[in-house]
Image: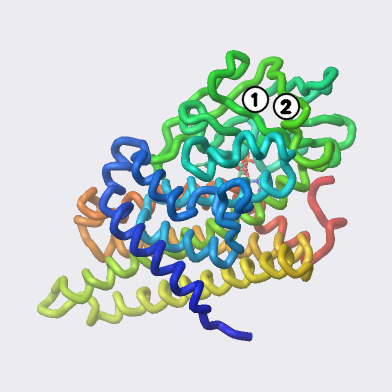
Amino acid sequence: MDFSWTAEQKIWRKTVRDFAQKKIKPKIREIDTNKKIPKEIIEDMAHLGLLGPTVSKEYGGAELDWTMACIAAEELGRADISLAIPVLYLVEAAWGFIFSQYGTTDAKEKYLPKVTSGDAFLGIAVTEPEGGSDIVGAAKTKAVKKDDSWILNGEKMFISGITESSNWGGIHLTLARTDPAAGHKGFSFFAVPLKDNPRIETTLLEDMGRMGISTGGFSMDDVELPENHLIGEQNKGFYYAMEGFSAARVLIGATCVGASEAALELGIDHIKTRKSFGRPLGSFEGIQFPLAEHYANIESVKLLNYRAAWIMDKMYREGKFSHHDVSLASAMSKLRAPIHAFAVMNEVADWLGAAGYTKEYPVEMGIRGVRSYSIGAEGTMNIMRVIIARELLGKEFLPYK
Ligand SMILES: Cc1cc2nc3c(=O)[nH]c(=O)nc-3n(C[C@H](O)[C@H](O)[C@H](O)COP(=O)(O)OP(=O)(O)OC[C@H]3O[C@@H](n4cnc5c(N)ncnc54)[C@H](O)[C@@H]3O)c2cc1C
């Protein structure tokens, strides 16, 4: 075992931190208010290799391994505790990787260079209006083969990046039934471009937080896609979706760690200087004990995250470990990280007193943003528990078939 960073990892962290602290952090209130990530930030991220960072170099990606991808996720979370930019980053990192692994060469050539250069968005569309947790039971979206095309009908809901995809162009990797009788073995994944498609209608939702990136839905009415927009093998879509979710969950863990550390550091500065009853707040045990607890929790989540990233690197680069190992490790990160991040931010808001309830401090943005992860983005807390129990007990104990 070796818990130290390599020289390359240290340089990468410093590079992303310098950029994010200088260019992103000063803009987060503006991003939260205007509900938009400025184009110059997108361009700078593209320049640094932070858009579709895990995509292969052939298509303009940085081909980062998962440890390096987590380092960047932490630094983006540390700079933007509203978590809007981290969401854009991690969605494209996780799902760009899936597309890069399994998409057809034609489709990859068409979309990926635009994603990695910041001229297009790449998102994921699994959830439907009737349910996200039980996607096998709830999914109604269907794709039917007609000559050399696929025809898609159905509706996706609570999807990140609807405005970005509609305005910039790009694709949402979209799950649809291709063999309705086959349960989870009857889904396929498609690259669906939303922009300028008269057969697609989009809707937008007003979120609680992470305002810089949109959430909404889209319905498809006989949307025709070329054959090469099928991703990977027909009827393997459910497995690709699970693979992408595992990757996204580890990166979510890392963004939560970065945002928690930023909030805790802000809190530490405050309790060292703010006086009450003639002493700094930080000299009271009632303040010190939660500080110690939160610090230990953040460190434990960090270990879970980097272990999960390490397992992923071993699996993808050395053929060791399995998708089950990755799924278990990433579910544990996702189960712990948003809960601890929320607790840290809530505590720091308390330490700030009335100021913690105002927009003078970024903590309220963090509280609103991190709740997206504990409510459900990339899987709810209970679904993480279901995954962990499945890995411990065996799939015959699953509450569903
Ligand atoms: C901000 C945000 C962004 C999102 N972005 C995307 C996106 O880009 N793409 C996408 O496809 N989806 C996205 N989602 C959707 C997300 O994946 C779903 O919200 C999630 O899967 C839960 O689905 P649901 O909202 O339908 O809740 P439901 O599945 O209806 O669940 C409701 C509640 O019931 C609980 N529950 C369900 N089943 C069980 C069970 N067996 N045992 C115990 N409890 C259970 C859940 O844990 C949850 O608390 C996003 C969600 C949010 C909040």
Residue matched to label 2: 141
Q: Residue 364, percent across and down?
A: 32, 51
Q: Quadrant of the C terminus?
A: top right
What residue appears at the point 60 percent right and 28 percent down from the top-left corner?
193
Looking at numbered disc 1 in the image, what kind of residue is underneath it?
Glu
- Residue at the spot x=84%, y=57% of the render? 395
Residue 120: percent from left, percent from top: 51, 35
Residue 317 in the image: x percent, y percent? 71, 66
Mark 2 surroundings within 10 Å by alpha-carbon count, few (fewer than 14), some (14 through 19), many (20 or more) = many
Position of 140 relative to 135 (above/below) = above
Counting from the top left corner in percent of width and height, residue 246 is at 66, 55
**187 with respect to 295 (left or right):** right
- State left or right for residue 391 relative to residue 157: right
Q: CB under 8 Å between callouts 1 and 2?
A: yes
- SS type, badge 1: strand
Figure quadrant of residue 200: top right
Disc 1 packing (10 Å; few <14; some 14–19; many ≥20): many
Q: Report which residue position mark 1 lands on.
A: 155
